[in-house]
Image (cartoon, rainbow, N blue to C red):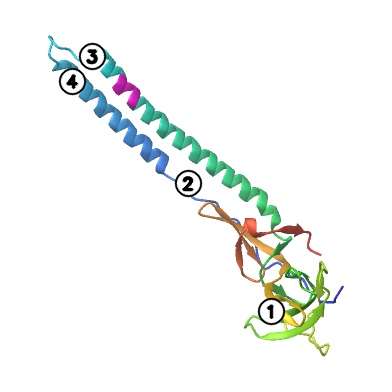
Amino acid sequence: MVETSSVQPLYSSNTTPQATTAPKQDRAVLSSDFETFLKMLTVQVQNQDPLNPIDSTEYATQLATFSSVEQQVQTNDLLRNISSTLGGNALNEMSRWIGMEGLVRAPAAFTGNPVTIRPDYEQGATAAQLVVRNASGMEVQRFDITVGEDTVVWGGRDGDGNALPAGNYRFETESYKDGQRLATTLSQVYSMISEVRNDDGTVVVRMSDGSELSSDMVDGLRAAG
């Protein structure tokens, strides 16, 4: 295993999603429409030709149609309530992630502690290098790694053994075959989760380096160590 750091939490917060007024508005419109429908139906009955009355099946059809609309509105309300409940439950569950380290394809905040990296190798690669870049994208270090090695631990030192400054660093895996570079891939890192929030129905995870990802982009969790 190659020596190489972890990240510390910056802050945490939870945001409660705002309740929607759409169900109340739908019900208000439905109630108004229903009253209008009953008035029109009453006028229709009062003014029908006594010698040629409207077939009762037409009334039944009209009532059934309106009932169907009413049921659809109620179903929509129910679905909104279920969605809101599930979203709240997901947020409550994922709030436990705060303070843990998530495996993400993103930069990592280096504060002096080792960062655990999971390189990605191109299929058919026979050699690989790990490239370290600072927040400006400048290459600060590169070194050989063994193809197939699951994890690399980076200690935050350059090739001469000098400690690098604290900051955000990203890690790229360069895959080679017969001396030819096949691909360059942003590597996954274990980075501290500092915030989890609901953003328009999507649970967003904020990492300690400041990057924000959808919760489904977190491929693993572990206790901070």
Whichever of callouts 4 and 3 sits on the residue coming sooner in the sequence is 4
Residue that label 4 marks: 44
- Image position, residue 50 (x, y; %): 13, 10
In the rendered structure, which amino acid carries the disc numbered 2? Ala
Q: Which mark is residue 167?
A: 1
The stretch of residues the image draws in magenta is: 61-65
Whichever of callouts 1 and 4 sits on the residue coming sooner in the sequence is 4
Q: Which mark is residue 55?
A: 3
Whichever of callouts 3 and 1 sits on the residue coming sooner in the sequence is 3
Whichever of callouts 4 and 2 sits on the residue coming sooner in the sequence is 2
Q: Residue at x 53, y 42 (%)?
A: 83
Question: How many residues crowd around disc 3 within 10 Å: few (fewer than 14), some, or many (20 or more)?
Answer: few
> In which quarter of the view is residue 56 placed?
top left
Q: Relative to the observer, which residue lies in front, 24 or 189?
A: 189
Q: Residue at x 27, y 18 (%)?
A: 59
Q: Relative to the observer, which residue lies in front, 145 or 37?
A: 145
Whichever of callouts 2 and 3 sits on the residue coming sooner in the sequence is 2
Cα–Cα gap, marks 1 and 4: 77 Å
Disc 2 or disc 1, which is closer to the eye? 1
Residues at discs 4 and 2 in contact (Cβ within 8 Å): no
